[in-house]
Image (spheres, rainbow, N blue to C red):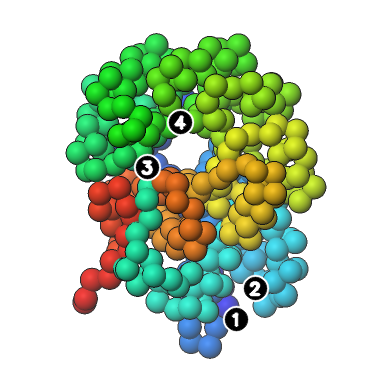
């Protein structure tokens, strides 16, 4: 068995804004594992400034993996437990090596016979820029839209108010993602505003590691709160159980590249469901290599909620893919070559 990796830089079609700043490029790594004349590919999708494994030893750990790819999988996973994006890539490459072509989790989805409902994603920006994005998504047929908020709440609130005036909650579900932009007192006011606007949920209203404040919010909130970045760096089963028990969120957001791949997603889902906590899966600016694997995995979970997987069209130099958004669903449609 032989492994190698390569670095790849994705370029955004247009600068994309969150409360953490403006994104113009996204760094990632592809890992290829070859065995008996077959090759599997995976993506180690590090998110600089956010990933738990964003440290100077990252490429060194990738080199270690390639040099030790012949080792038992449990040994590899233990060594990589603090490098969730590399674990994510390793799992993909091994699955693809086994299934061939561009398959990771074969299903009706990979056969082009069934689609996945997804939300439309609205990036921060000027009033006109955000309104144009919203209109484009509505024209495409989306019935669930997620807006990034937290830069200028008064402006953002006005946009959501105008949107709600035109589209009641029965027609359009609205989610917002603050990426930890607010403090506790501001978040409490924002939650009240969002409730009046019939918003479905807010992701990560306050910064991570403020478990007491997040618990206060979740225990007395007029709308659902979803933990997102809060899950990053939570490695052990005990840690996962503790954070869910302490905060008791209404939902958790699962990003496979940030939390250690599909096996860790499975564990989070099992623990959440035991505590009657909802969940959905989203991508985290992977290339189409990682996104393809995430979508295939997501379909197998059969969660009827709109998932956050509509990020494949953000880059100018993405890897070619047969993932296609039709209306509000993501499909994998093979083209005859």
Element under disc 1: loop
Q: Does residue 122 appear anywhere in the picture? A: no
| Spatial separation of the CA atoms under disc 2 and disc 3 | 37 Å
User: Percent position (x, y) of residue 159?
Assistant: 31, 19
Do the numbered discs 2 and 1 sit on residues whose CB atoms are within 8 Å? Answer: yes
- 203 vs 144, nearest the viewer: 144
Badge nearest the viewer, 4 or 2: 4
Q: Quadrant of residue 266?
A: bottom right
Q: Is residue 315 above or below residue 228?
A: below
Asked whether the residues under the numbered discs 1 and 4 touch, taking CB atoms below 8 Å apart as contact, a structural biologist would say no
Secondary structure under tag 3 reads loop
Q: Sequence-wise, which precedes: disc 4 or disc 2?
A: 2
Q: Quadrant of the C terminus?
A: bottom left
Asked whether residue 299 appears in the rendered view, the answer is yes
Q: CA distance from mark 2 to mark 1?
A: 7 Å
Residue 276 position by quadrant: top right
Task: Identify the residue under disc 3.
Answer: 119
The residue identified by callout 2 is 69
Q: Identify whether 199 is placed above or below 192.
A: below
Residue at horizontal 41%, vertical 49%?
Answer: 309
Q: Position of residue 64 (x, y in %)?
A: 67, 64
């Amino acid at each position: 068995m032989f492994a190698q990796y390569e670095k790849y830089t994705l370029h955004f079609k247009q600068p994309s804004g969150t409360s953490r700043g403006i994104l113009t490029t996204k760094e990632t790594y592809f890992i290829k594992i070859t065995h008996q004349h077959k090759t599997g590919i995976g993506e180690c999708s590090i998110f600089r400034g956010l990933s738990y494994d964003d440290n100077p030893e990252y490429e060194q750990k990738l080199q270690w993996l390639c040099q030790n790819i012949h080792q038992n999988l449990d040994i590899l996973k233990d060594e990589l437990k603090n490098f969730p994006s590399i674990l994510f890539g390793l799992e993909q490459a091994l699955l693809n090596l086994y299934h061939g072509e561009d398959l990771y989790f074969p299903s009706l989805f990979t056969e082009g016979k069934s689609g996945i409902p997804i939300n439309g994603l609205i990036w921060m920006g000027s009033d006109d820029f955000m309104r144009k994005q919203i209109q484009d998504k509505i024209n495409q047929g989306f019935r669930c839209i997620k807006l990034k908020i937290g830069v200028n709440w008064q402006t953002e609130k006005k946009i959501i108010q105008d949107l709600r005036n035109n589209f009641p909650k029965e027609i359009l579900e609205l989610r917002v993602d603050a990426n930890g932009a607010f403090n506790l007192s501001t978040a409490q006011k924002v939650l009240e505003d969002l409730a009046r606007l019939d918003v479905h949920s807010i992701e990560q209203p306050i910064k991570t590691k403020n478990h007491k404040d997040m618990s206060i919010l979740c225990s007395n909130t007029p709308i659902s709160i979803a933990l997102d970045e809060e899950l990053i760096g939570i490695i052990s089963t005990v840690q996962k159980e503790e954070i869910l028990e302490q905060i008791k969120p209404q939902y958790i957001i699962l990003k496979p590249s940030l939390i250690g791949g599909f096996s860790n997603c499975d564990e989070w889902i099992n623990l959440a469901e035991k505590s009657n906590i909802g969940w959905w899966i989203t991508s985290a600016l992977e290339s189409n290599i990682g996104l393809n694997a995430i979508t295939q995995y997501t379909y197998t979970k059969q969660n009827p909620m709109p998932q956050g997987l509509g990020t494949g069209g953000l880059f100018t130099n993405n890897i070619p893919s047969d993932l296609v958004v039709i209306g509000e669903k993501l499909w994998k449609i093979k083209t005859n070559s």
